Amino acid sequence: MIHKLTSFSTRHRWMMIVIWTVLGAGLSFVGKVMMYDVTDSQSGDFLPKQYDSAVALRIAEDKFGAAPDPNALTVLVARNDGGKLTADDQRRITGTAADLGHERIKAAKPEPLMKDHSQTPRVSPGALAPDKSFRLLTVSLDGNPQDPGVQDVYKEFRDAAEREFAHEDLRVGFTGGIASTVDNLDAEETTGKVVGMLTMGLIVLLNVLVFRSVLAAFIPLIAVALIGGVASGAVVGAAKLFGIDLDPSTPSLIGVVLLGIGIDYFLFLMFRFREHLRNHPGQDARTAAQETTRRVGGAITSAALTIVAAFATLGLASFGQFRVLGPAIAISVLVMLAASLTLMPALLALLGRAMFWPARAWKKEQTGGISARLGHAVSARPVRYALGSLVLLGALGAGAVGMKMSYDQQGLPETAAVRTAEQIARSLPAGVSDPHTVYVSSTDGTDLKASSLTGMTRALAKQEGVGTVGKPVLSKDRTAARVDLLLSVKSDTQHARDLVSGPIRDTAARTTPQGAKAYVTGTAAVFADISTAVEKDLRLVFPVAALLIAVILFLLLRSLLAPVVLMLAVGLGFGATLGASTLLFQHTLDRPGISFTLPLVLFLFVVALGTDYNILITDRIREEMAKPVSVRHAVAEAVRHTAPAIATAGVVLAGSFAALAASPATQELGFATGLGIILSSLVLSLVLVPALAVLLGRGLWWPRRSGRTRGHHAAEAPPVPGHHQPYAAAPEYRPEHEAVR
């Protein structure tokens, strides 16, 4: 099938390029217009329905009409001179707040087909500080807080509030909700742009250094950007079609994944294309592109399907953020695979040898160099290199001892929103801007009475860590009640999560009236439930993903032993990466633990993406072993030919992920995935796997026998770097020509 597909693509190369260009332009526009309609920033919305906080959120919406508001923000109003608010000050604050709540904010004119976010904010009075140093207001806006249009509306409101209160000699501060989102984005904007430019620069620089060509440096980037637009539109369209909400981080992760694997696959093809043109100087570009893709297409397809299978297993997760991330990335990778077998061959067929202009040295094979020396060293001393790799991976993996999960927000920038929250916390309970609520629901249909909840409110007020408990509020049908409480500790800490998931829930359950049941919600409660869901998902997704990857490797390599070797290798790489991350963030930087999402996402990224390189080197080792040469010679040649592609692709992919480390929200993910890809490409694929291949010999393909001419033995010496001789007596290798199967 791959042969037919690439044959069609190279034969109709112009048509294929036009089709992908039109798709890229159209679907990227669809993705841009609809992206914020299919994203949800509320973590609680991704919890399974049976979890305590999820049930509480449904009661809040069904009985009290209080749907979670991701845009709710707290406004602090204080005197410019820092003095206490007088009665006159408080009247002016109330009046100005009312005026702001009646003034419609006009958003900037939206782009075609995009929603107009013009609206009137809802402003309501809040708490007065005990020392009367400030007054709080609560403001709510409609729309996705990640949507630039909604953010612009907030900025207009912020500017208007600052201007109106300044006329009354009062100052304002904003925190929570969309205020924190906008401040964080503004703080990271410059860093994000710089990192993005550096990432693009790294890719261009590496391609220029490797290929000495302008086209080879920029064509892959242009193609991947085009394919990324198609993938974005496909993911958004699928989410819209099936009514799925995406996590706000999904688009950025998809972009990083596609940039990395897209450049990888393009590099795999270009290296092999260049090698093919060198060995067949008289062949036309279309035939060369077709033959190249036929040779590498199987490995690329298996590598892509490995990623798809691994991430598709996230669809089994109970936590919604994982469940939607997996299929979204799987769809994107399938789009990239389709482009790798159609658009990329068409570009190679069109450009041909001009792809490597103005370089000329590539036309003559370089038999020496680092790759050749590495292949010779590994094949000559496989035990030494295998043990060295295992020691390195084991030492890094040991860092995982004592690993803990953290749900705290680490490394957030020092913004105006953070400073406002700290000022509020000095005078009011720490949870005042992020209250928690106990919802009591009748289980037998009888009416609830406020007096029956007195015991609960008193017991909760006596609980250590609880600052204030409000009076019970009954729903209109009197079958549900709401009890608000403020914690005396910050809601986004482990202490708050332990408090809510333990003593508060236990106390509420113990003191609930007969015939009713209590549910607790709020930031700490939601993340306590998320931790339970994540632990459950880890136990399910890990083995299923590993099994699917093993099956794909078996189908590619048609061997039982080779997939086991590769799975053990990537398992060691995952353990080493997780250990190094724990060592850095938990033990060295003294954080409470590593991010709760890191182990699962890291497992999928490192195992699935890292397997790409193992597939490429193993496929080339099998190809070389099918020739009438020794095992050592075959492994050395495989490393010599493949190391440049794997090393370059590994550095590019690692650099793409490392760019995530610039943002505090994805710092751990960026470091861990970048390190994991480096270990997978440079240590596992170029050292450990080749060394094990030499030690196992052609038995690596058991029970399938490798095509080998009799009279050649694995003990023969590997080629000496710089003295490579072509195999004049050996026919050109083709999979269908293997002597023994």
Image: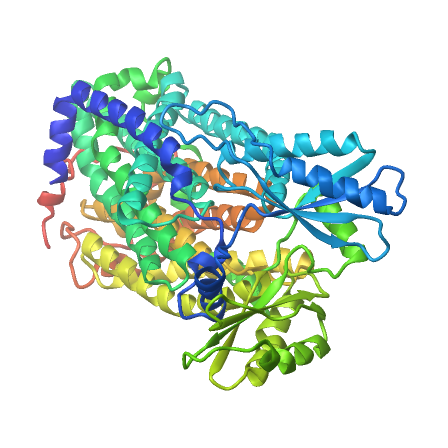
Residue at 20% in and 60% down: 559
643 sits left or right of 708 in the view: right
Q: Which of 348 and 380 is in front in this view?
A: 348
Q: In this view, does 303 lie above or below 96?
A: below
Residue at 25% in and 56% down: 553
Q: Is residue 99 above or below residue 561?
A: above
434 sits left or right of 569 in the view: right
Q: Can residue 340 be seen in this view?
A: yes
Instruction: Give the position of the N terminus as an image quadrant.
Output: top left
The image shows a total of numbered marks equal to 0
Q: Nearer the viewer, residue 647 or 188?
A: 188
Residue at 69% in and 79% down: 458
Instruction: Residue 72: give x, y in percent of width and height.
Output: 58, 48
501 sits left or right of 208 in the view: right
Residue at 45% in and 68% down: 55
- The single residue placed furthest to the top in the displayed view is 358
Instruction: Residue 590: give x, y in percent of width and height.
Output: 69, 60
